[in-house]
């Protein structure tokens, strides 16, 4: 959301549903409104927020946040108006102001919508709401209403350029921010934003050379680096430009300082596969196998060959080349996964077996992605024979036992350093749980968050989903990379059918 939406000199009445969906509309962290005059019918807010604060959901979290902000504004406001018509007014340094109106303009009506319409009539203002029904009701009563449905930050943009500009981009290693604004686009690039150039002459770039990522550390738009990354396993490659962008974020060096990476979008686009595959490729979790000898009898692939070659080099044989040493070097020490509570199970204590055996039936999705990851590498057993489906299944089982699983309710007090942390199906989590997971990430660690806000039913719309709110808050941060996956780029045929025919609301 940008300030330019409402900087037109008008007064706006903020309906409660809009404040719940978009608490940042008040810019609570910086105490700066997004319009010249924002009117809050405080009577409706007080009645509703007191009820919602005791709930155990995201609405309670936002209700507490709104209540604290309104209390702070009330304490710093001036009391204005005549007796019986008093209201609170807080003015900012730039002349903008917030008005807290405690009066019930519609008698004893319990409806917040009716009260909001009456308040807008009194102040001759326009209503801001995210409820389509309120827009209709307001217009039938002669009150203007603005339907608030902002576009969530996608993390990328497409830019059409000429043949001369495309040649300049291809030959140069990067484009400075100043050169970007002077020759490519007037809109400045955000931190860690991706750009996909579309050539007017119809030329088709090779190896996604038309895609770049803005580096806030150097203040330049740079070509993708992961193609030169020796950590990317064999036969693991992107199928479209959006996946190429995801590879760049998932395999970024620690010096790139991408503490948090968020992939969101329709099902079947490769979000979980890319993040889980990158975690396995950058972590030497094979050393922690619970039954290593048995697994090595089945799997005699690249790892065993590298280990034998290393022993040979240490005993005076031929030295290993630099690329192989880099590929063997683990970037992270462990993989931690945090599925939503609905996947972890509510009654684990009643299930027989150890923790892994209790969780096994709820983590089939992870195991299937690992099997696909191993199958794509076409590893071979001793004697040169390729691993069959049974070999891959056993290998995936071993990798799963080496991954640490936790739940959102167990994160408080933890600190994760030197690990790669995966938060999957984040749309089913509370906003406070996603925030807690990000807060736990320490030095030499990265968290990758995956989800699709449109997959969950939300009474306030998908844009009020916890994951969508987190994306809006974190967009543009120096250490955060956000990327939306398009539904029409789905890698599963079934997911493509659903996207084409059910037409989910686009984010």
Image (cartoon, grey):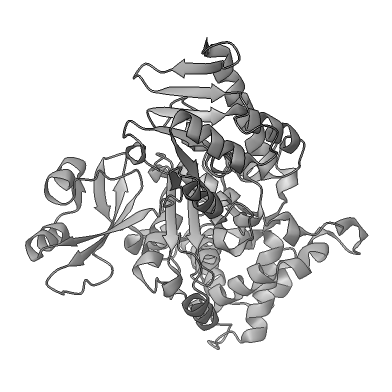
Hey, which quadrant is residue 480 in on the image? top left
Q: Quadrant of the C terminus?
A: bottom left
Hey, which quadrant is residue 428 in on the image? bottom right
Frontmost residue, 52 versus 98 = 98
Residue at 63% across / 74% down in the picture? 368
Frontmost residue, 89 versus 187 = 89
Residue 275 seen anywhere in this rendered image of the structure: yes
Q: Quadrant of the N terminus?
A: top left
Frontmost residue, 263 versus 337 = 263
Residue 24 lies, in percent from the top left, at 50, 36
Residue at 64% across / 67% down in the picture? 366
Residue 429 lies, in percent from the top left, at 66, 51
Residue 213 lies, in percent from the top left, at 31, 53
Residue 93 lies, in percent from the top left, at 37, 16
Residue 231 seen anywhere in this rendered image of the structure: no
- Say above or below: 267 vs 94: below
Residue at 87% across / 57% down in the picture? 347
Frontmost residue, 484 versus 338 = 484
- Say above or below: 456 vs 269: above
Q: How many marks?
A: 0
- Say above or below: 341 vs 443: below
């Amino acid at each position: 959301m940008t300030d330019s939406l409402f900087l037109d000199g008008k007064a706006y009445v903020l309906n409660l549903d809009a404040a719940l969906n978009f608490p940042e509309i008040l810019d609570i962290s910086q105490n700066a409104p997004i319009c010249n005059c924002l009117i809050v019918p405080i009577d409706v807010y007080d009645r509703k927020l007191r009820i919602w604060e005791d709930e155990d959901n995201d609405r309670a979290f936002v209700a507490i946040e709104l209540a604290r902000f309104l209390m702070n504004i009330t304490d710093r406001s001036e009391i204005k108006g005549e007796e019986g018509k008093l209201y609170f007014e807080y003015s900012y340094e730039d002349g903008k102001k917030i008005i807290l109106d405690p009066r019930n303009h519609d008698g004893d009506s319990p409806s917040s919508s009716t009260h909001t319409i009456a308040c807008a009539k009194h102040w001759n203002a326009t209503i801001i709401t995210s409820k389509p029904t309120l827009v209709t009701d307001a217009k039938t009563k002669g009150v203007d209403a603005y339907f608030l449905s902002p576009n969530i930050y996608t993390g990328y943009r497409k830019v059409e350029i000429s043949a001369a500009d495309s040649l300049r981009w291809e030959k140069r290693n990067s484009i400075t921010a100043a050169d970007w604004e002077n020759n490519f686009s007037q809109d400045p690039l955000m931190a860690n934003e991706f750009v996909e150039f579309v050539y007017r002459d119809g030329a088709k770039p090779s190896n996604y050379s038309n895609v770049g990522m803005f580096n806030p550390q150097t203040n330049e738009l740079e070509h993708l680096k992961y193609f030169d990354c020796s950590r990317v396993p064999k036969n693991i490659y992107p199928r479209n430009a959006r996946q190429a962008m995801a590879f760049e974020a998932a395999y970024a060096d620690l010096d790139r300082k991408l503490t948090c990476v968020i992939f969101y979008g329709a099902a079947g686009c490769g979000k979980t596969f890319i993040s889980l595959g990158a975690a396995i490729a950058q972590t030497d979790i094979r050393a922690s196998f619970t039954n290593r000898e048995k697994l090595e009898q089945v799997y005699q692939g690249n790892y065993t060959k590298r280990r034998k070659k290393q022993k040979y080099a240490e005993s005076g044989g031929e030295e290993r080349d630099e690329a192989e040493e880099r590929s063997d070097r683990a970037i992270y020490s462990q993989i931690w996964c945090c599925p939503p509570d609905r996947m972890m199970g509510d009654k684990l204590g009643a299930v027989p077996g150890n923790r892994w055996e209790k969780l096994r039936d709820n983590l089939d999705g992870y195991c299937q992605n690992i099997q696909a990851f191993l199958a794509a590498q076409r590893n071979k057993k001793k004697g040169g024979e390729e691993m069959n489906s049974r070999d891959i299944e056993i290998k995936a089982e071993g990798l799963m036992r080496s991954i640490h699983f936790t739940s959102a309710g167990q994160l408080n007090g933890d600190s994760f350093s030197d690990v790669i942390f995966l938060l999957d199906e984040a749309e089913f989590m509370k906003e406070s749980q996603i925030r807690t997971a990000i807060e736990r990430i320490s030095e030499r660690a990265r968290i990758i968050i995956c989800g699709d806000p449109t997959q969950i039913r939300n009474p306030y719309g998908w844009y009020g989903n916890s994951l969508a709110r987190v994306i809006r808050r974190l967009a543009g941060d120096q250490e955060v990379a956000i990327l939306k996956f398009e539904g029409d780029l789905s890698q599963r045929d079934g997911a493509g059918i659903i996207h084409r025919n059910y037409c989910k609301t686009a984010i």
